[in-house]
Amino acid sequence: MGSDSDLPVMQGAVDVLVDFGVPFEVRIVSAHRTPGVMYEYATQAHERGLKVIIAGAGGAAHLPGMTAAKTRLPVLGVPVQSKALSGLDSLLSIVQMPKGIPVGTLAIGEAGAVNAGLLAAAIVGLHDPAVAGKLDAYRAAQTRRVLEEELPVPGAAAPAADQDRAK
């Protein structure tokens, strides 16, 4: 992430990776304040065994794009809300990468961080059956929760499919 103030948003990705048992590291690497550190981090990431990088940044949000420019690993960009434009500036900075340097761009804020964690787990799961199994279980649990949810609408009849299951 670009600064420690991004951690409350990026915690969503951290929590997902912990839940899925995906090893990870958390670093503050600024494209503007520590460009040498960013360059070294990105160029050595593959050699160090990383499989994917999640980069969260606000404002000008150059971290995901600059990181992607220096590594062949997939980079997932999470736009962090900014005070000036509520994260729209961050989103546009990340999503508008020039042709040839892709960054997978997620939603602004916490939803984007959680989805970045899930997408990173899916990427890791391509070669790690344990992570893939946890992702499958997570998705099945989501489906169950939706199917079991009942709306508190007095007098409403259950959908036909539910009535058929009840017989």
Image (tube, rainbow, N blue to C red):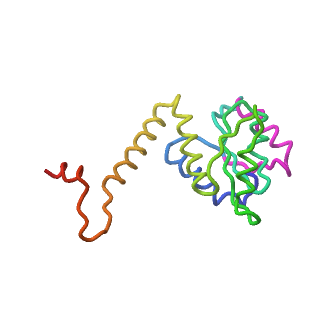
**Residue shown at the point (57%, 55%) measured from the top left:** 111
Q: Quadrant of residue 83?
A: bottom right
Where is residue 145 drawn, in percent x and y? 36, 54
- Which one is in front, 45 or 52? 52
- Which one is in front, 55 or 14? 55
Looking at the image, residue 80 lies above or below residue 44: below
Where is residue 24 drawn, in percent x and y? 62, 42
Asked whether residue 142 is drawn in magenta, I would say no
Looking at the image, residue 128 lies above or below residue 85: above
Asked whether residue 29 is drawn in magenta, I would say yes
Residue, far bottom? 154
What is the span of residues highlighted in magenta in the rendered image?
26-46
Residue, far left? 167
**Residue shown at the point (82%, 47%) measured from the top left:** 31
Q: Quadrant of residue 153?
A: bottom left
Total count of labels:
0
- Using residue 160 as the reference point, say whether residue 103 is left or right of it: right
- Using residue 15 as the reference point, say whether residue 83 is left or right of it: right
**Residue shown at the point (43%, 36%) measured from the top left:** 133
Where is residue 15 drawn, in percent x and y? 55, 52
- Using residue 110 as the reference point, say whether residue 2 is left or right of it: right
Looking at the image, residue 68 lies above or below residue 113: above
- Which one is in front, 131 or 156? 156
